[in-house]
């Protein structure tokens, strides 16, 4: 058995916390919420409780009965599951790899088989692929801050990459395609998190893995997504070339075709080419209107996302009034996500450029609040570009 530098029960506490993407401070909050009124009155301050959690996870102290119960309630597990029980092997490999543990999602046998495959990649099989696919799906579907999503997906990517050299050929191919999808997701989250250099580096990794897997559709997807990192690229011509290259690989499913064309439109907008931008946006909308679509990858190419892109393109082209026409014809509320924060920031930008100060300020206020709560740094960057027109002084009518 592999030796670790903390007691196994301490490792278990850390694994349970990290699987939920909680900081030690957030776990302290959850414990306070799980306490009844009497227990809550006896709890120390949040900072003190967070320091106690740090001591428990390092194995320097073990929680007493009161804190054990609060930990179990916060995690939603019984004492045996919180303090290892029969899951020593599972705890060890999650602790060492940083791959998130999702209690109750996998059987003990599935956890054990994955741990053995990580120790010896030749043991990887279809079950290993399904295991990693399920984890990626969970964290992709969850409404998480981009930074949290990165922290969850990065160790998963590292785990998948370990199999490339030694896994058998069909399994290796499946893991390569999974690695490419995962790298692309991490790239997108770095972009949303305001880190364009990391976004580009992870996009390069996604394209390399897709090419190594010799999967034309996956390569087209990674190229189309790379073209969406328009302000990270800083070269409108390269953005257009990437989007066009995605379609060179053959007939794409409608949503992927729309993705490629609306990212190409971004490039044309940045280059100041209104005619080509509008043409690609119209083609993108036509592709979105097709009902049949078997795109196997997860990305947002909804009508709402399309409208946001149109607004951003028109603002880049100095056509604020046209952008406002789209906004006023768009549906109302959208979910509270980093994408919604960016949409509101684009809205604020359009109103500002149209000299509608009050509407711009209100949209910017909403975008700022949502960006802070969702970790939407791209929205914050868009807000920083806005120049709100000064409030006009009221004219006084002088009666003679």
Image (spheres, rainbow, N blue to C red):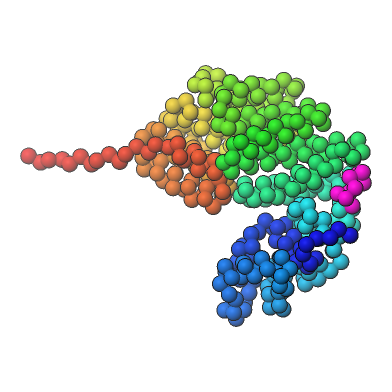
Q: Nearer the viewer, residue 256 or 225?
A: 225
Residue 172 screen position, x and y as percent? 87, 37
Which of the 4 image quarters holds residue 254? Answer: top right
Residue 253 seen by the camera: no
Residue 262 screen position, x and y as percent? 60, 28
Residue 76 magenta-highlighted: no
Relative horizontal placement of residue 128, taking residue 398 as reference (left or right): right
For the C terminus, the quadrant is top left
Residue drawn 90% across the image and 47% down it: 120
Relative horizontal placement of residue 256, taking residue 103 as reference (left or right): left
Q: Nearer the viewer, residue 396 or 332?
A: 396
For the N terminus, the quadrant is bottom right
Residue 320 screen position, x and y as percent? 43, 30
Total labels drawn: 0
Q: Is residue 218 above or below residue 367?
A: above
Relative horizontal placement of residue 202, taking residue 346 as reference (left or right): right
Q: Nearer the viewer, residue 11 or 269?
A: 11
Residue 120 magenta-highlighted: yes
Residue drawn 77% across the image and 57% down it: 95
Residue 353 seen by the camera: yes
Residue drawn 80% across the image and 46% down it: 159
Which of the 4 image quarters holds residue 293? Answer: top right
Relative horizontal placement of residue 345, taking residue 43 as reference (left or right): left
Residue 207 screen position, x and y as percent? 73, 31
Secondary structure mostly seen in the magenta stretch:
helix
Range drawn in magenta: 116-125
């Amino acid at each position: 058995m592999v030796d670790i530098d903390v007691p196994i029960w301490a490792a278990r506490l850390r694994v349970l916390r990290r699987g939920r993407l909680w900081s030690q401070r957030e776990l302290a909050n959850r414990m306070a919420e799980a306490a009844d009124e009497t227990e809550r009155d006896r709890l120390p301050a949040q900072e003190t409780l967070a320091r106690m959690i740090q001591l428990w996870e390092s194995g320097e102290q073990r929680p007493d009965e009161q804190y054990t119960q609060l930990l179990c309630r916060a995690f939603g597990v019984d004492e045996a599951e919180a303090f290892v029980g029969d899951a020593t092997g599972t705890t060890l490999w999650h602790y060492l790899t940083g791959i998130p543990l999702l209690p109750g999602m996998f059987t003990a046998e599935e956890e054990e088989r994955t741990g053995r495959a990580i120790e010896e990649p030749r043991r990887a099989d279809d079950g290993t692929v399904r295991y990693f696919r399920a984890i990626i799906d969970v964290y992709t579907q969850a409404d998480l801050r981009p930074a949290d999503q990165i922290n969850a997906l990065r160790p998963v990517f590292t785990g998948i990459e370990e199999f490339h050299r030694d896994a058998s050929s069909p399994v290796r191919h499946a893991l390569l395609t999974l690695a490419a999808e995962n790298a692309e997701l991490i790239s997108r989250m770095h972009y949303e998190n305001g880190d364009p250099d990391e976004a580009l580096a992870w996009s390069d990794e996604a394209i390399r893995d897709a090419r190594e897997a010799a999967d034309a559709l996956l390569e087209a997807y990674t190229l189309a997504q790379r073209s969406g990192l328009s302000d990270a690229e800083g070269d409108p011509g390269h953005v257009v070339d990437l989007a066009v290259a995605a379609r060179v690989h053959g007939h794409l499913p409608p949503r992927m075709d729309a993705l490629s064309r609306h990212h190409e439109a971004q490039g044309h907008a940045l280059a100041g080419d209104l005619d080509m931008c509008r043409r690609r946006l119209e083609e993108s909308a036509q592709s979105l209107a097709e009902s049949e679509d078997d795109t196997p990858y997860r990305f947002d190419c909804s009508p709402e996302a399309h409208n946001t892109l149109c607004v951003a393109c028109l603002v880049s082209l100095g056509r604020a009034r046209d952008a406002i026409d789209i906004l006023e014809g768009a549906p109302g509320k959208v979910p509270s996500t980093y994408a919604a924060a960016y949409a509101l920031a684009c809205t604020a930008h359009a109103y500002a450029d149209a000299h509608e100060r009050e509407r711009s300020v209100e949209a910017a206020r909403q975008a700022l609040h949502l960006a802070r709560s969702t970790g939407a740094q791209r929205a914050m960057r868009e807000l920083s570009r806005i120049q709100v027109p000064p409030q006009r002084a009221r004219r006084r009518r002088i009666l003679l």
